[in-house]
Image (cartoon, rainbow, N blue to C red):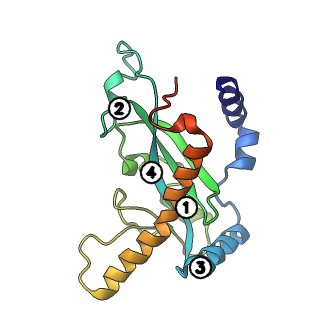
């Protein structure tokens, strides 16, 4: 099992391979197809992807590393992990992944450091579109999140619909961890 993980990891670390397997919508035609796909399935206009982070358990790093002290890898559930950001499409295809951050890093911090964050998303598109996120992210013109205190029925419906569509990323995380069981909390990576 560990040899397979090593081979897949090494392959995905090759830029030419990663770019063909995991890529975030570079051309307007792809964006239009994806927007139409989300709309046809969920009747939610303008959506290009759903963003969330998931924790991948790791063995406790060495205490004596000044650049990466052990305590920064301890997440809110009190185990060592990497906090991995994923963006997926309606068919659970992962379009973007960022696994550079420790378990204590907040989802919104990871997103703010992402190469496709904010202005970069707007520059790449000639038309308006959105990502959907949970309340761990701040609402932006290109990132829709739940309304904190919905004041009317329409806002409550918006939150319900957004929550319903967001189950896609939860399923994506579940499928990923079920397929690669070493990503589960109790199957710690070294």
Q: Which residue is mark 4?
A: 111
Residue 13 coordinates in the image, percent (x, y)? 67, 34
Q: Which residue is mark 2?
A: 79
Q: Which quadrant holds residue 104?
A: top left
Q: Which quadrant holds residue 8?
A: top right
In the picture as drawn, the residue positioned furthest to the bottom comes out as 153
Number of other residues with Cα within 10 Å of mark 3, as a class: few under 14, some 14 to 19, many 20 or more: some
Residue sitting at x 47%, y 65%: 166
Residue 25 coordinates in the image, percent (x, y)? 66, 61
Q: CA distance from mark 4 to mark 3?
A: 24 Å
Q: Which residue is mark 3?
A: 39
Residue 141 coordinates in the image, percent (x, y)? 43, 70
Number of other residues with Cα within 10 Å of mark 4, as a class: few under 14, some 14 to 19, many 20 or more: many
Q: Nearer the viewer, mark 1 or mark 2?
A: 2
Mark 3 / mark 1, whichever is N-terminal: 3
Q: Nearer the viewer, mark 4 or mark 3?
A: 3
At mark 4, the secondary structure is helix
Q: Which residue is mark 1?
A: 121
Residue 50 coordinates in the image, percent (x, y)? 52, 62
Q: CA distance from mark 4 to mark 1?
A: 12 Å
**Is 14 on the left or on the right of 95, as rendered?**
right
Mark 4 / mark 3, whichever is N-terminal: 3
Residue sitting at x 36%, y 12%: 64
Mark 4 / mark 2, whichever is N-terminal: 2
Q: CA distance from mark 3 to mark 1?
A: 20 Å
Q: Which quadrant holds residue 72?
A: top left
């Amino acid at each position: 099992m560990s040899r397979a993980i090593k081979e897949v990891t090494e392959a995905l670390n090759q830029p030419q391979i990663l770019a063909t397997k995991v890529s975030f919508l570079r051309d307007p035609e792809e964006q239009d197809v994806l927007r139409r796909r989300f709309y046809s399935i969920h009747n939610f206009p303008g959506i290009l992807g759903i963003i969330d982070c998931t924790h991948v358990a790791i063995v406790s790093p060495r205490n004596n590393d000044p650049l990466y002290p052990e305590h920064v890898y301890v997440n809110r559930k009190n185990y060592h992990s990497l906090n991995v950001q994923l963006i997926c499409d309606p068919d659970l295809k992962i379009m973007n992944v960022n696994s550079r951050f420790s378990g204590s890093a907040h989802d919104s911090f990871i997103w703010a450091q992402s190469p496709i964050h904010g202005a970069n998303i707007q520059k790449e598109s000639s038309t308006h579109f959105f990502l959907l996120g949970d309340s761990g992210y701040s609402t932006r013109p290109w990132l829709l999140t739940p309304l904190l205190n919905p004041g009317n029925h329409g806002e409550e419906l918006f939150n319900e619909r957004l929550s319903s569509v967001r189950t896609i990323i939860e399923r994506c995380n579940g499928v990923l961890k079920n397929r690669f069981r070493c990503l589960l909390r109790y199957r710690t990576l070294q």
